[in-house]
Amino acid sequence: MEKLTKKYGLPTAICMVVGTVIGSGIFFKAQNVLSATGGNMPLGIVAWVITGLLMIICSTQFAVMATKYEKVSGVVDYAEATCGKGYAYYIAWFLVHIYYPGMTSVLAWVSARYFGVIFGWSMVGPEVMALAGFFLIASYTMNAISPKLAGKFQVSATVIKLIPIFLMAIVGTFAGLFNGTLTNNFSNVVTEAVGGTGGGLFAAIVATVFAYEGWIVATSINAELKNAKRNLPLALIIGAFIVVVAYVFYYIGVAGGASNEVLMKDGATTAFKNIFGTIGGTVLNICIVVSCLGTLNGLMVGATRGMYAIASRQEGPKQKMFNQVDPSTNMVTNSSIWGLFVCSIWLIYFYGANLTNGWFGYFNFDSSELPIITIYALYIPIFVVWMKKEKSLGVVKRFILPIAAILSCLFMIFAAIYAHGITPYLQAKANGSFSFPVLFYFIVFVVIMAIGFLLRKPLKNKE
């Protein structure tokens, strides 16, 4: 049977981490962070730093695991090595049908949104949605036909996406200090955050989660990474630090380009135009589009390999079909087709739930944030069993680091429930009715996982 080959090196792996994490989130979630904190810049920076530290802790824990376990698909491998094949299957099923497609579909829309800004299109208009569908299919096509080209695009997009971030971080900071905008933004608060300072901080942290998420996708190329036990841990740790530094300084730089009131209303686009002029702002906006497409590509890598990760373990439906590797492209074609199909479903959901008046009633929830929080909850059993099983490790790697990772995950779960809580969908149609997004997301989660239970079909001698 055809197998996936070792075709990626350390630079590609680092770019998978940096390129998948740094994408749309930093550009459009910065506005959400400001809104959540009521325009409190210092509180927003605290949120970026806290979430960044949590990401570094969790990625470091997985980096340690990567030195011991190597099979097909990173986090699924770690789940199998610690909690067994059953738990690994359900982790993989969740990644395939909720996590990867939920985030991938949002990235397709965000890429189209920033492209549409150049031409003045409405972000909820038909042009943007049509382009979102095209970007989704184009990313799939590149990954399905030429995985090596997708890897090269990931490296190129990562370099390009760092241009607007570092330019804004440096130029925006100095310009803001010179004209007084930065000082004014740091010393003045626009309005009191909903729920006070604590509520604003938790809401801001949850908003930054999306911007920081995606690093785990790098583990999906485990089977295709040269010297994976060395290169994957290095990529996770180096990439995580690069992301945190870039985000914090970018956020400060944006504050030098426009007032908090303007940033809360219009986002970072105005800051780019104020600092670099209309032409410069347009050029940098194009870089943002490339940045988003790079993240979309990285997420598509994970989405297309999901069913293969399940079938290669002789689990799930149509194992022989999804376990196929194309001999000419060395790509898991059937798994890729399914990944694209599920992504398209979530794109339709995202549009109906978040960009309209709400097609799904109480079942309207943020598909860019809640699935991310779920994955943190699913990490916890892996970390707990790791402490019980890995008796040969020292105190730091066996206990201190995984305990810190567990606490990080619990904090993220609490912050998500606190922030989304009983927040009504679309403000419950102008504060007229009750809604509990976390609960209704959980119902969807349970239904999808129950389908996975019914379709598991493991080989008896492999359980």
Image (cartoon, helix red, strand yellow):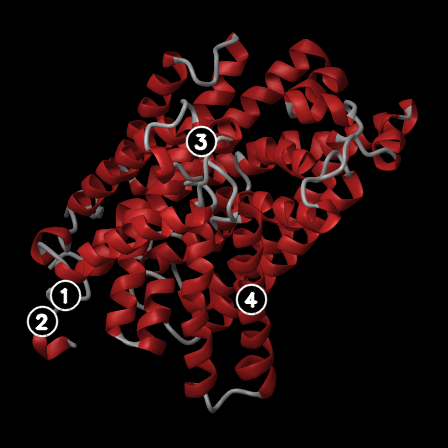
Badge 4 amino acid = Thr
Q: What element does badge 3 sit on?
A: helix
Q: Label 3 near label 1: C-beta < 8 Å?
A: no
Percent position (x, y) of residue 322? 14, 52
Residue 293, which numbered label? 3
Residue at (59%, 57%) from the top-left corner? 238
Reading the image, the residue beneath label 4 is 60
Q: What element does badge 4 sit on?
A: helix
Q: Is residue 28 left or right of residue 74?
A: right
Percent position (x, y) of residue 120? 52, 8
Q: Earlier in the sequence, mark 2 or mark 3?
A: 3
Q: Earlier in the sequence, mark 4 or mark 3?
A: 4
Residue at (39%, 36%) from the top-left corner? 364
Q: How many marks?
A: 4
Q: Label 1 near label 2: C-beta < 8 Å?
A: yes
Q: Label 3 near label 4: C-beta < 8 Å?
A: no
Q: What's the CA distance linking mark 2 and mark 3?
A: 39 Å
Reading the image, the residue beneath label 2 is 459
Residue that protrudes farthest toward the bottom in the picture: 391
Q: What element does badge 2 sit on?
A: loop
Q: What's the CA distance linking mark 2 and mark 1?
A: 6 Å
Q: Is residue 378 left or right of residue 64?
A: left
Residue at (40%, 51%) from the top-left corner? 439
Question: In this rendering, which labeled residue sits more in front, label 2 or label 3?
Answer: 2
Q: Nearer the viewer, residue 218 or 24?
A: 24
Residue 314, which numbered label? 1
